[in-house]
Amino acid sequence: MKRCFILSLFLSLFLYNVNSQDTFYFDPNSLSSEGENYFMHTVERGQTVYSISKMYDVSIESIYRLNPGSEQFIQSGSQLKISQSKQKLIYHTIEPKETLYSVSKKYGITGEDIIAANPGLSIQTFIIGRTIRILLNQANTTPPTTDSAKKEEDTNDLLFKTPETKKVNAINVAILLPFGTKEKTIPGDLQSKVVEYYEGFLLALDSLKQKKISINLQVYDTGNGVQYLQQILQTDELKMSNLIIGGFSDEQIKLLSNFSDNHVIPYVVPFTSKNDEILKNPYLFQINTPSGYLYTKASKAFLNKYKNHNIIFLQDENTDRADFVQILKNDLSVENIPFKTVVYSSKLAIDLLSLLSFNKPNVFVPSSGKSEALLKILPPLLSLNQKQTHHLSLFGYPEWQTYDLGDYSESLYQLHTTIYTNFYVKQDAPETRSFYKKFLLWYGRPVINIYPKFSILGFDTGMFFIQVINQYGTVFMPDINSFKYNGIQTNFYYQRISNWSGFINANVFFVNYNPDLSVTRETR
């Protein structure tokens, strides 16, 4: 099939203008330590010192300095001091009995100003301990002291309002990716992944056409860098988009994020789980869950599933999953759930015998997700399992689904294994078989066997976001989780990281390998 890419190039570059007024007003109750102003941030699950530093545009070193011990570990629910030194904005931590009206009076600005600076703010998110932004260039030098009761009521009612949306007859979608038509320097494996993502997206458009949904698709080859992308961003049709998808490198994502933010266009980052733009663009949607949030969600789900088990950590010389193990151990300690640790040795089966429980089921958690680490622990665990004197199960990692275990191909089933992952394709599901068949019919070749499968990622992305816009209009953010889509490879459940950030996909699957050789996928 011939692929046609619509490429529009202009010479001028859009410039992002920022109001440069410097008027600001500090809260008279602002906290200080050794002459340095700070506010309190309540740590939420999945956050790291790095992500918090990017959220507030402060250095990691300043967080370490104000919070001794934070360089080792931070606990969700704890509070960190964050330096308050900005000249154009400050951050306010919501306190007991505060309302939107009282906060607006404190800083001499309107409730509308606060809502504009915090697009995620609502009656559900205006809660004690959460942080909001205050734009100082909108503040008066002296806050108003009196106001009418009607003004107070109207201001507080702003938290109940949802932004106006607009239904469109045809949804304008733009895909911007490095397809390789402009540059010969794009690696072949990258080009094949990107093209297959696009091909899967086209299959979604065909399925949506059957649902009578009209879509105008514009496709742009960005090249490997930003030269072509800077020109593409000047096209008039791109500014008319209802949805932008794409960007591969950090530099491309930053440019697209700025464009999205300036023109208030929802922007989907389809591949990377690591980008800082998610922390500051309220219209950005990230599909691949950042590791910190994935680990904490998986840990919480682990506690729900295994809290009544005898939990045994298998410590290996490979510690590639040390971050997850540390989070899990900390969560277990907070909930007063006991656990044990054993160091791998050639006598692991013997060492484990004294740690096993007869009274409750046992679950093993390795410290590594590598294939060599898994192949080391399987023989002793299988030998214990054959005795049938204890109930044993194994908990593991997303990459396990990609391994060829050879002679141990059925071992995950025998050990009642569960892995956490945000991507999983159930190969025998009717919708999967239908997708494979249609892909082969359209493109004359099978889907590339990689993890995740880029073709299905493109299909799921198109099916979800275009149907959301079709149902809820162009401003769909407040309703995004009301739309239920059971994806072939991933589901979508979006959460803001802060009141002014974009959205991360908080979906996590538990994939269960059952003794009858069946596999079940459950959303946690």
Image (cartoon, grey):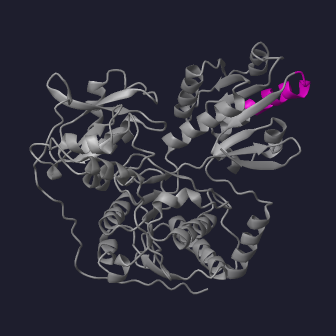
Q: Is residue 403 visible?
A: no
Which residue lies at the image location 26% right of the left edge and 25% below the top edge?
65
Where does the image place residue 126, in percent across and percent down from the top left?
Answer: 39, 43
Position of residue 91 in the picture relative to residue 363 (left or right): left
Where does the image place residue 141, in percent across and percent down from the top left?
Answer: 9, 44
Image vertical order of residue 451 relative to residue 301, above or below: below
- Residue 410, quarter of the rendered image: top right
Which residue lies at the image location 70% right of the left edge and 57% below the top edge?
425
Where does the image place residue 255, in percent across and percent down from the top left?
Answer: 32, 64
Position of residue 140 in the picture relative to residue 46 (left or right): left
Image vertical order of residue 59 relative to residue 284, above or below: above
Give the total of numbered labels: 0
- Residue 386 falls inside the magenta stretch: yes
- The majority secondary structure of the magenta stretch comes to helix
Position of residue 63 in the picture relative to residue 320 (left or right): left
Image vertical order of residue 204 relative to residue 495, above or below: below
Q: Is residue 384 visible?
A: yes
* Residue bounds of the magenta highlight: 377-389
- Residue 279 falls inside the magenta stretch: no
Where does the image place residue 292, in percent across and percent down from the top left?
Answer: 49, 40
* Identity of the residue furthest to the front in this view: 149
**In front here: 315 or 176?**
176
Which residue lies at the image location 49% right of the left edge and 36% below the top edge?
45
* Identity of the residue furthest to the top in this view: 354
